[in-house]
Amino acid sequence: MAHPLSGKVVIAGIGHTAFGKHPGRSTVSLNVEAIRKALADAGIEKRAVDALMVKAPTSKFEMMYAQKLAEALGMQPRIGGVYDHGGATNISMISYATMAIEAGQCEVAVVSLADNPATGSRQAYEKSYGDDGSALFGWFSTPAGYAMVAQRHMAQYGTTSDQLGAIAVACRRHGAANPHAQLRKPLTLAQYRESRLIVEPLRRDDCCLVSDGAAAVVLMSAKKAAELKVAKPVPVLGFGQGQTSWDVALRPDLTTTAAKVSAQTAFAMAGLTPADIDVAQIYDCFTICALMTLEAYGFCAPGEGGHFVEGGRIEIGGELPINTSGGLLSETGMPGMQLVLEGVRQMRGDSVNQVKGARTCAVSNQGGIMHTHSTLLLGV
C-alpha cells in the first residue's frame, strides 16, 4: 500500500543550461538560467516561489550561497538553503521540498544545481586518501576509490570489464541521439576495450564527463498544479535515502551500499516493486556504480549485475532501458539533476529516446564514493 504522501506533490517544470563548458560564467548565473527555464516550463511567475533549495557547488564553496542565488533571482523565499550530500543532493532536496509542501511550509519550491568544474576548479575530485602516505602508492583521486570497489566486485562475483563496457555502450548510444548531450559519439564494445586505463580496471569510457552546467525543477502540490493549469505535471510517487558514512578503506564490505535502504524506502512509499518500473535513470559517475545500483535496487540479485546489463537489456528496446538521455557518461557529468529531468521527460512522453508506454521511472542519485544515496520514483 502506498504512503498517503505518494502522488500528492508533482514536478511541474524543468529547465537546464547547455552542458559542456561555460568559461567565465559563475555558478549563480548558471543556476539563474536553469531556474528561469524551469519556471517558464511550469508556466508560473517567480513571485509564486516561496522555497529555494540549491546544491552547494563542488568547484567552489561559498557561504550563504542560497541567499546569493535568491538575491540574483529577485526572490524572497520563506524556506530553503544550500545542501550537500554530494551527487545524492538533488533527490534529497526534492524529498525535503515535497515534505515541506505537504506540511504547509511552502507552496511552490524550486530545487536547483549548478557547477563549473570544466572551466573552474576540479580539486574536489582529486582527494588524497589516508594520512599515511598511501597517495604515493596510487591511492589518490575519486577514480581510485571506484576502481577499488570495481576490483572487489570482479573478484567476488566474476564481473568482467566487458560487462562494465555494456553500460558505457548503452549510455553512449542514448546520448548520441540526444541533441543536448555533451558527448554525442556512440561507442562499440570494441572501442571500449581500446580506451585507455585510468585506474585499473576502469577505462576512460567507464568514467563520467567533467561538465559545466545547471539544471532545476519546480515542485508544487498536485492540487495547486491543477489550479494553475500546469500542462504536464509529473507525480512524485516515492523517495528514500541511505548513507554509508565510512570511507572506502574503512568499509567491511565494498560490494554493498546504502542504495538498498534508499530504494526499499522509496518503493515502500510508492507501493511499488522493481518489477513495476518501466525505465530507470541510474547514477553512472562510473560504470561500476550503475551496475551495483541495479543490484541494490533489486532489478537483479547481488553479483548478477554483470549478466543483467548484457545483450542490450538496458538499452532502448530492452527489458529495462536506463539513462535514456545519456547519463553522466554521455549527456553531462553534472551530478544527478539531469537524471531527474530525463525521468520527467519519460513520464511526460516527450523524451528523444522515449520508452513506449512508460508509466513509472526510478531515478538514482549517489554521492561521494558510494557514501550517500537518494532514490526518486516518478509516475504519470
Image (cartoon, helix red, strand yellow):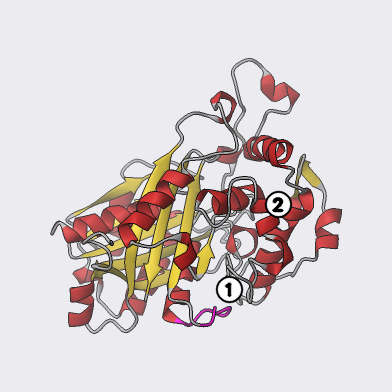
Q: Which mark is residue 180?
A: 1
The answer to whether one can see residue 16 in this image is no
Q: Which mark is residue 221?
A: none
Point out the image quarter for the C terminus: bottom left
275 lies above or below 316:
above
Task: Name the residue that disc number 2 marks.
Answer: 206
Percent of width and height locating residue 291: 62, 52
Identify which residue is drawn at 61% across, 66% down.
Answer: 326
Q: Dot 1 surroundings within 10 Å: few (below 14), some, or many (20 or more)?
A: some
Percent of width and height locating residue 8: 23, 67
Disc 2 or 1, which lies upstream in sequence?
1
Q: Is residue 351 magenta?
A: yes
**Residue type, mark 1 in image:** His
Question: Which residue reaches farthest top?
Answer: 132
**Region of the chain picked out in magenta, as a range:** 349-356
Corner quadrant of residue 51:
bottom left
Identify which residue is drawn at 54% across, 69% down.
Answer: 18
Q: Nearer the viewer, residue 236 or 154?
A: 154
Corner quadrant of residue 320:
bottom right
Q: Nearer the viewer, residue 341 or 3?
A: 3
- Number of callouts: 2
**Residue type, mark 2 in image:** Asp
Percent of width and height locating residue 301: 58, 50
Horizontal relation, residue 72 to residue 364: left or right? left
Give the main secondary structure of the magenta stretch: loop
